[in-house]
Amino acid sequence: MTESTAYTKVFDSPAAALDDLFDGATLLISGHRGMGVPESLLRAVIESSVHDLTCICHGAWPHGDDSVDLDDLVKAGRVGKLITPHGFDPDRPGAVRSLWESGKLQIEIVPQGVLAEQLRAGGAGLGGVFIPDGIGTRFQDGQEVRRFNGRDYIFRGAIHADFALLRADSADLFGNLTYRGSQRNWNPPMAMAARISVAEVDEIFEPGGIDPELVITPGIFVKRVVQTL
Amino acid sequence: MPDLEDKPRLDREIIAMRVAKELPNGGYVNLGIGIPTLVSAYLAPGQVVFYHSESGVLNCGPLAEEGEEDINLINAGGQFLQPVPGMSYFGSADAFAMIRGGHVDVTVLGAHQVSARGDLANWMLPQRGVGNVGGAMDLAAGADDVIVAMEHTDRQDHPKIVEECTLPLTGKGCVSLIVTDLAVVRCTPDGLVLEEVAPGWTAEEVQELTAARLMISPDLQEYQL
């Protein structure tokens, strides 16, 4: 990386990129089954002093090694509420399970495809979406149901978050992102649905260093970029 | 009647083998966690099936060898995949648009209970925490064809095919076929039809371990592999 470009979204450190994180903020955190989580950004949140965060993610999935995962974030006392398709594995101990059992953590379970669509709706400026997933189940309770073309759909409001913590393979200084394999999963809809999206990446390029045909998340959805540590 | 609890049943691999026969050539198929994951090992020679995973991978193939694992190439259950020709990657919203939009032909799911009307309960045991719904509810609502692959009874030998599900539902009337270690049961608008029984088992014995009424198909046969 050279100093030739005047404008850059790259921050010096994960902590600098999350300097304005605040108590009670809503965070989107990418990763699937605990893999591909933005570890350096999570570590920065753990080392901050914020509390009462609402974290929307695929699940906490304790890693059981010295890598950082969402369970560590919960263990550090940063999280007041999790919104996720996966509460916790009852056969696997972890902070999520113990804090939930002691009433110190709220967990809201949401079907995975519903969550994905609520995020996309938030990112696309919609008020919400009508979704067939969960009709006839407890997820219908208290929700507006409408029938279109003979089929019932549940209204689910769009999600707008304060921050998204993303994990990508590469970025350029303008925040255009590429991914590797299944790493992509939650990043594109989460990038769109937050006011401030922060991407942790392995490699940072000058503008032009990424073929525009290969950009998966355009830089307009990414406010800040940091190098993974 | 002799004690059915001790009578030999088919193993998980045989259930998976039977389910594999239901997959259309060239079909797009999503396999859930547990017995469904085993299905991919039993395709017919020359049969092509494109496996879809909610982790954002299409054309998932075999699992990675030890030492070759890549955290950026996983299936919905978090197992490491081998890279194979013809794969594609996509984000979570697109993964579920494929499911909900009717583009996935068949999904194979495990179950805690299936009801006489084809209702499915597979995401929550209330005594075991808040539940793990994952993508099951979206698959139940979205896939053209939902096949359940499961043991016929639970660990206490309680029937898992029941008149009404007592556990929280994943989907209503969504199941089209139930393949167990004792039988193949089709869900029809008129109720459950017993089509195949495991070798050595009679329709009456299967009914004994089923808590919903089974209609016996006029073409009842032994489990077809």
Image: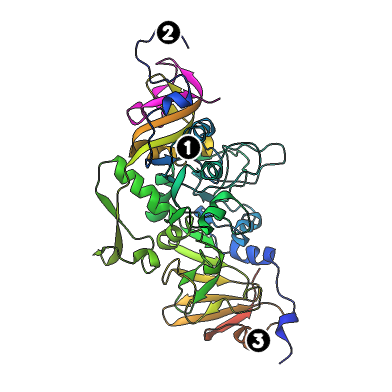
Q: From the viewer's perspective, is residue B217 above or below residue B135?
A: below
Tell me whether marks 2 and 3 sit on the same chain: no
Range of the magenta residues? Answer: A202-229
* Label 2: how many Cα within 10 Å (few below 14, some 14–19, many 20+): few
Disc 1 versus disc 3: nearer the observer: 1
User: Mark 1 vs mark 2: which is more N-terminal?
Assistant: 2
Q: Look at the image and tell me in which quarter the C terminus of chain B lies.
A: bottom right
Front one among A7 and B207:
A7
Using the rendered view, name the quadrant where residue B22 is placed: bottom right
Q: Look at the image and tell me in which quarter the N terminus of chain B lies.
A: bottom right
Point out residue A203 in the picture as x, y percentages from the top left corner: 51, 21
Q: CA distance from mark 2 to mark 3?
A: 77 Å
For label 3, the SS is: helix
Mark 1 residue type: Arg
Q: Say whether marks 1 and 3 touch (CB < 8 Å).
A: no
Q: CA distance from mark 1 to mark 3?
A: 49 Å
Q: Which mark is residue A184?
A: 1
Q: Chain of mark 1?
A: A
For label 2, the SS is: loop
Using the rendered view, name the quadrant where residue B18 is placed: bottom right
Side of B35 relative to A217 (left or right): right
* Label 1: how many Cα within 10 Å (few below 14, some 14–19, many 20+): many
Disc 1 versus disc 2: nearer the observer: 2
